[in-house]
Image (spheres, rainbow, N blue to C red):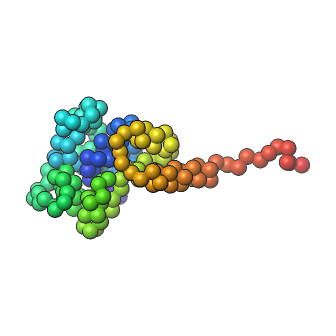
Amino acid sequence: MTSIVVADAGPLHYLVLVDCAGILGNLFDQILIPVAVRDELLNLNAPEIVKAWIRRPPPRLKVERVTNVQPIHGLHPGESEALQLALQAKAAGVLMDDLDGRKAARRLGLSVVGTVGLLERAAEKELIKLPDAVARLRQTNFFIAPEVLNQVLERDRLRRAQARPIQKDPGLQR
């Protein structure tokens, strides 16, 4: 089964900033973005590294037009178009950080993953070292409750501890 997701600007922006955008192609077969999201990533105020990335997007990222754009109250154009594109494309889910956008996605029956969830999935597949990625994320203006990041890091620590084979102390063997 092909996994197609639609991304809002936020997760793409921050994955680029923390040098983890490459995980997308390992997590999904195709990433769609609406024109409004592409335009947000090209905004004059966007960091140059983000603008450079979207000017030469990875092969699995495609810009698609929403056929019948309908603004969704309380959401920015990129979020509205991302949700509508997800429905239009029958996508597996949406990549989105905005709380109101996430609530709207769930009301529409869409599954949602944010930046931190993407980083955690990538760490589970051993594509990245989560503590390093989180440290870089903390150096940006990304907003999330510190306790949420601490919980994610603790789950990662426990997962890695369980994955390591138990080393026997040679002094205890007979």
Residue 126 at x, y = what percent? 50, 45
Regarding residue 56, the answer to whether it shows in the image is no
Give the number of callouts: 0
Q: Residue at x 55, y 52 (%)?
A: 154
**Above or below, 48 relative to 163:** above
Q: Residue at x 67, y 49 (%)?
A: 165
The residue at the far left in this view is 68
Residue 17 at x, y = what percent? 35, 37
Q: Is residue 80 left or right of residue 163?
A: left
Q: Residue at x 16, y 52 (%)?
A: 77
Q: Residue at x 13, y 59 (%)?
A: 71
Q: Is residue 80 left or right of residue 100?
A: left
Residue 161 at x, y = what percent? 62, 50
The residue at the far right in this view is 174
Q: From the viewer's side, name the closer residue of 165 and 16.
A: 16
Which of the 4 quarters of the picture holds residue 84? bottom left
Residue 137 at x, y = what percent? 41, 41
- Classify the position of the N terminus by image quarter: bottom left
Regarding residue 14, the answer to whether it shows in the image is yes
Which of the 4 quarters of the picture holds residue 170? top right
